[in-house]
C-alpha cells in the first residue's frame, strides 16, 4: 500500500469530482492521503475533508507564499488547532524566495513560529523550501540547537547540501513527481543518497504531475509513478519501496497510526 504524504484536496481543482479523485487513489493502492493546510484561516476546509474521508488526514499551517497574510498566527494557536483528532502535522511552512510573495524577514519569522509549534505539539513539521537553501540550513541548524523537532522536507527540489544537512538533523525527505521528469538526473542522484528510512513520496497535487501525466492535473493516485521511479533509484521493487515509504510515513506522522483503514474501501 502507498501513502500520498502531501496533497491539497481542498483546492478548487478537485471540487467537481473530489469523491472520484479519492476513489481513484484507493483503486491505485493509496492507503492514506495527507491534505496539507496552506492558510490557518482556512483550516476548517482541510479539517472537513479529514472528517469526511476515513483515509484522509490533515495538517495546520501557513504556506510561505501566505506568510504576509498571516504574520501574527501564534504557536499556541497552531498547537490548539492541531489537537483535532485527525490533524497529524504542522505546516506546510518554510521559505520560498522564487516569487517573493512574502518578505523574507516575515517568512523567516512565521517559519520559526511553526517550528515552535511542532516542538511544543510533538507533531512533525512539513517544510516547504524553494531557492532558499542557505537560510533554510541556517534556521534549521539554529532551531535544532534550541530543541529538537520532527520534520520532512517536502517536494524536495533543492541542492544536495540541504538534503545532507536535513538528514543529519534527523529530517525526512519527500519526493514528488519532479523525481520522474526526464531532466531530473541531479535530483535522482540526491534521492539515491538519502537513507531508506528517511524517504517519503508525495504528489503535491494538483501540481507537478509525474512524467507519464505531464500537462494534466495531478492527483493522489499518481503517487504510484513517483514510488516506482524512486524504487528504481534505490534498486528495489515498487512493492518494496511502497512498504518502505508507508512505514516511514507512519513512523514520522505517528499520530496517524490507527486513524486510517488497513485496506481502503468504497468512497465515503
Image: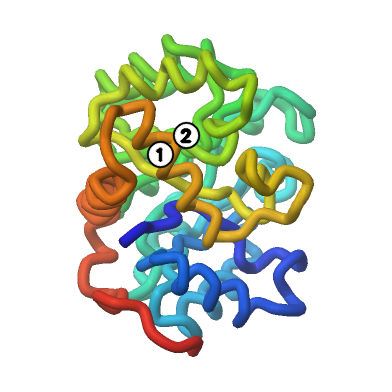
Taking 98 as reference, is 7 left or right? left
Q: Quadrant of residue 110?
A: top right
Q: How many marks?
A: 2
Q: Which image quadrant: the N terminus?
A: bottom left
Residue 44's spot in the image, x, y percent?
58, 74
State whether residue 241 is above or below residue 5: above
Residue 71's spot in the image, x, y percent?
65, 44
Mark 1 residue element? helix
Residue 180's spot in the image, x, y percent?
55, 33
Q: Is residue 108 visible?
A: no
Residue 252's spot in the image, x, y percent?
26, 48
Cα separation between marks 1 and 2: 5 Å
Q: What scheme was used to colour the molecule? A: rainbow
Taking 14 as reference, is 117 left or right? left
Q: Badge 2: few (under 14), some or many (20 or more) residues near its Cα, within 10 Å?
A: some
Q: Is residue 193 visible?
A: yes
Q: Residue at x 24, y 56 (%)?
A: 250
Mark 2 residue element? helix
Q: Residue at x 46, y 22 (%)?
A: 188
Labels 1 and 2 touching (C-beta < 8 A): yes
- Residue 115, label in figure: 1
- Residue 112, label in figure: 2
Amino acid at each position: 500500500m502507498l501513502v500520498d504524504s502531501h496533497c491539497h484536496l481542498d483546492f478548487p481543482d478537485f471540487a467537481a469530482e473530489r469523491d472520484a479523485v479519492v476513489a481513484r487513489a484507493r483503486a491505485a493502492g493509496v492507503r492514506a492521503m495527507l491534505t496539507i493546510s496552506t492558510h490557518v484561516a482556512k483550516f476548517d476546509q482541510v479539517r472537513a475533508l479529514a472528517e469526511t474521508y476515513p483515509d484522509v488526514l490533515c495538517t495546520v499551517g501557513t504556506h510561505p507564499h501566505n506568510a504576509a497574510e498571516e504574520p501574527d498566527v501564534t504557536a499556541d494557536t497552531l498547537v490548539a488547532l492541531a489537537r483535532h483528532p485527525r490533524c497529524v502535522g504542522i505546516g506546510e511552512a518554510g521559505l520560498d524566495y522564487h516569487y517573493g510573495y512574502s518578505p523574507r524577514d516575515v517568512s523567516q519569522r512565521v517559519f520559526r513560529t511553526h517550528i515552535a509549534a511542532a516542538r511544543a505539539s510533538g507533531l512533525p513539521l512539513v517544510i516547504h523550501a524553494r531557492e532558499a537553501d542557505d537560510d533554510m540550513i541556517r534556521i534549521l541548524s539554529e532551531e535544532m540547537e534550541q530543541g529538537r523537532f520532527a520534520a520532512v522536507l517536502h517536494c524536495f527540489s533543492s541542492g544536495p547540501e540541504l538534503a545532507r544537512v536535513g538528514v543529519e538533523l534527523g529530517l525526512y525527505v519527500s519526493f514528488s513527481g519532479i523525481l520522474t521528469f526526464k531532466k531530473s538526473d541531479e535530483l535522482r542522484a540526491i534521492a539515491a543518497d538519502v537513507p531508506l528510512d528517511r524517504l517519503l513520496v508525495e504528489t503535491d497535487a494538483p501540481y507537478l504531475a509525474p512524467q507519464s501525466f505531464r500537462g494534466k492535473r495531478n492527483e493522489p493516485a499518481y503517487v504510484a509513478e513517483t514510488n516506482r521511479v524512486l524504487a528504481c533509484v534505490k534498486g528495489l521493487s515498487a512493492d518494496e519501496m511502497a512498504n518502505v515509504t508507508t512505514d516511514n510515513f507512519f513512523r514520522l506522522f505517528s499520530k496517524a497510526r490507527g486513524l486510517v483503514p488497513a485496506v481502503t474501501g468504497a468512497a465515503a
